[in-house]
């Protein structure tokens, strides 16, 4: 009897201890996005499982079961493109071929421009140049003198046009020339930059770093230091640089142990934030508003037509407000990673654009007038790096090149221009301009019977495809042939600088239409009436299983 009593009491006590833990664990599981972007460990396992294989010549053109005449058209088209590229881009290609063996990044980007199944044959047939010699206005000129409209936006750095940045760098260098690259002391322009950053962000203190990745690291470290908690929350699909803790999925051999990847725009995430005591900060990349919970849309995974993007400003604003409330209630640092969108959406950045204040804001890319930079702005309560009452308990952050005079000079030149009337005027009706351009793009594509549609967050665009085709990624090469320069991720991310005039935009649109017409005529969008995005995905899975086993 006594034994039974003791056992029951022990079981109940164990249950009482375990139940809250189990509830918390369950809540956390529910807040994970069902896709692979929400399950980093599984995503890594899947990535490790995917077998390496490549289509041979026949498979390359006929992987969707296209009839022989369509395959012949595709074959002839690739040959034509090859000849065209070889002739027009001869010097740029020669330089690229010579440099490739010793530039790891070039080998990587070259291999992952298109889905891996197609990559090998494509690289054998169609070489893509990486070298250019000039940029001006909204164009880039390669080594052979070909002029392309720039849709790369220099990874987001180029907000105001490349000439703006050339001027910032030249002006900045002139300002600090007497000091040169002396490090450790500050050039007076540092104090001015700090004042402007505090004013712009509405925050109290600033620290300078050498890249966006590094600045994100510091923001998270500060949040951990001041909260005394170790977990960081990031959202499915969001990019915050390539530091281990913010990159739990494929691409990082060392899985972080202290990061939670949760669903964005979902009440289950709020429930986790409300109930746990171990969360130091929530990292928000507002670019995700264009494709919540999905990874950056690159053409290397564009194997069907299901890529989707849509920006709902009201819904995202509501989400940020909810995050703000719960973070304030729970003492969690709300960190806006504005490295990408910083000065692109509004003069006051995402805080102003969405009307939601953050505790820490990270800027980068554009803010040093075209030179490398990462900046953390924050409330004093989050920024301080030591404690008066415990002098040995510090939050260490250094960096040889922090506050480099030339970077700071270019930043000051950036801010002076940025605050000028002509640049501020660019923000007037900015969204209206770019939304109208997206509408005209989509109307034109529909009128032409072309299966393209664009979605945008202001001047950042994603191209989607109505065709359930395995070959949508081919468009990037047609666009290049028609004088449009894209970054290596292809049509998933077009970045326009704000100096694009309506005439420039119209010219880009005409080239898009011409490129897409060619691609259509060459048979890449042929598809069997029963082919759907789902059937493509099933076919690919079958293919992989067959290769694997
Ligand atoms: C939102 C965001 N955070 C951080 C980074 C990393 O910045 P960097 O490439 O300067 O290290 C990027 C880069 O694209 C970014 O878009």
Image (spheres, rainbow, N blue to C red):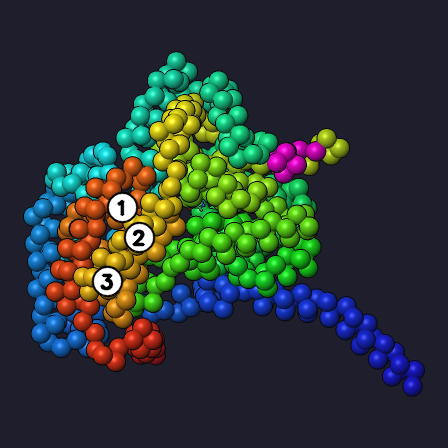
User: Which residue corresponds to mark 1?
Assistant: 151
Whether residue 437 can be seen here? yes
Where ligand 1 lies, by quadrant? top left
| Callout 3: SS | helix
User: Which residue corresponds to mark 2?
Assistant: 438
> In the figure, residue 455 lies in which quadrant?
bottom left
- Residue drawn at x 38%, y 27% as measured from the top left: 421
Magenta stretch in the rendered image: 379-387
How busy is the neighbourhood of tag 3: few (under 14 within 10 Å), some, or many (20 plus)? few
Q: Position of residue 271 (x, y in %)?
A: 64, 61
Extreme-bottom residue of the structure: 1
N-terminal of the pair, mark 2 or mark 3, is 2
Q: Position of residue 82 (x, y in %)?
A: 11, 55
Q: For the residues marked 2 and 3, what is the alpha-carbon distance in whole angstroms?
A: 12 Å
Residue 372 bears which disc, if any? Answer: none
Foreground tag (1 vs 2): 2
Q: Position of residue 124 (x, y in %)?
A: 16, 58
């Amino acid at each position: 009897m006594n034994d039974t009593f003791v056992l029951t009491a022990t079981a109940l006590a164990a249950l009482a201890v375990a139940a809250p833990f189990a509830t918390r664990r369950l809540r956390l599981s529910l807040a994970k996005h069902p896709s692979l972007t929400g399950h980093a460990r599984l995503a890594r396992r899947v990535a490790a499982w995917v077998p390496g294989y490549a289509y041979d010549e026949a498979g390359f053109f006929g992987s969707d079961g296209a009839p022989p005449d369509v395959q012949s058209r595709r074959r002839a088209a690739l040959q034509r493109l090859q000849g065209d590229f070889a002739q027009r881009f001869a010097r740029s290609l020669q330089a690229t071929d010579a440099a490739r063996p010793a530039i790891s990044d070039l080998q990587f980007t070259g291999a992952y421009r298109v889905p891996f199944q197609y990559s090998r044959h494509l690289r054998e047939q169609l070489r893509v140049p990486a070298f250019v010699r000039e940029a001006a206005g909204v164009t880039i000129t390669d080594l052979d003198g070909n002029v392309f409209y720039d849709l790369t936006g220099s990874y987001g750095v180029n907000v105001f046009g490349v000439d703006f940045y050339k001027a910032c760098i030249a002006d900045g260098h002139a300002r600090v020339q007497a000091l040169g690259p002396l490090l450790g002391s500050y050039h007076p322009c540092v104090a001015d930059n700090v004042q402007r950053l505090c004013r712009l962000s509405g925050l109290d203190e600033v620290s300078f770093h050498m890249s966006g990745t590094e600045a994100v690291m510091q923001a998270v470290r500060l949040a951990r230091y001041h909260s005394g908690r170790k977990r960081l929350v990031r959202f499915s699909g969001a990019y915050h640089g390539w530091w281990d803790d913010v990159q739990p999925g494929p691409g990082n051999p060392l899985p972080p142990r202290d990061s939670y990847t949760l669903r964005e725009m979902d009440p289950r995430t709020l429930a986790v934030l409300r109930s746990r005591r171990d969360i130091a900060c929530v990292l928000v990349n507002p670019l995700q508003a264009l494709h919540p919970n999905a990874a950056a849309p690159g053409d290397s995974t564009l194997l069907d037509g299901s890529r989707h993007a849509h920006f709902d400003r009201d819904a995202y604003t509501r989400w940020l407000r909810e995050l703000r409330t719960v973070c304030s209630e729970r003492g969690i640092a709300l960190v806006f990673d504005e490295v990408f969108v910083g000065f692109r959406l509004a003069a006051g950045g995402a805080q102003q654009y969405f009307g939601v204040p953050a505790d820490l804001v990270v800027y980068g890319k554009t803010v040093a007038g075209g030179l490398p930079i990462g900046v953390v702005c924050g409330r004093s309560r989050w920024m301080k790096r030591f404690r008066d009452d415990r002098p040995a308990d510090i939050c260490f952050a250094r960096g040889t090149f922090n506050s480099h005079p030339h970077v700071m000079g270019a930043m000051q030149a950036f801010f002076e221009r940025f605050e000028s009337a002509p640049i501020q005027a660019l923000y007037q009706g900015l969204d209206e301009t770019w939304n109208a351009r997206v509408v005209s793009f989509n109307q034109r594509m529909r009128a032409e019977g072309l299966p393209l549609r664009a979605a945008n967050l202001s001047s950042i665009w994603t191209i989607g495809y109505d065709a359930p085709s395995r070959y949508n990624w081919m468009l990037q090469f047609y666009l290049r042939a028609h004088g449009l320069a894209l970054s290596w991720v292809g049509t998933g991310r077009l970045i326009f600088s704000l100096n694009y005039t309506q005439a420039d935009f119209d010219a880009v649109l005409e080239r898009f239409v011409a490129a897409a017409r060619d691609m259509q005529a060459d048979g890449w969008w042929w598809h069997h009436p029963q082919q759907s995005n789902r059937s493509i995905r099933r076919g690919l899975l079958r293919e992989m299983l067959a290769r694997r086993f």
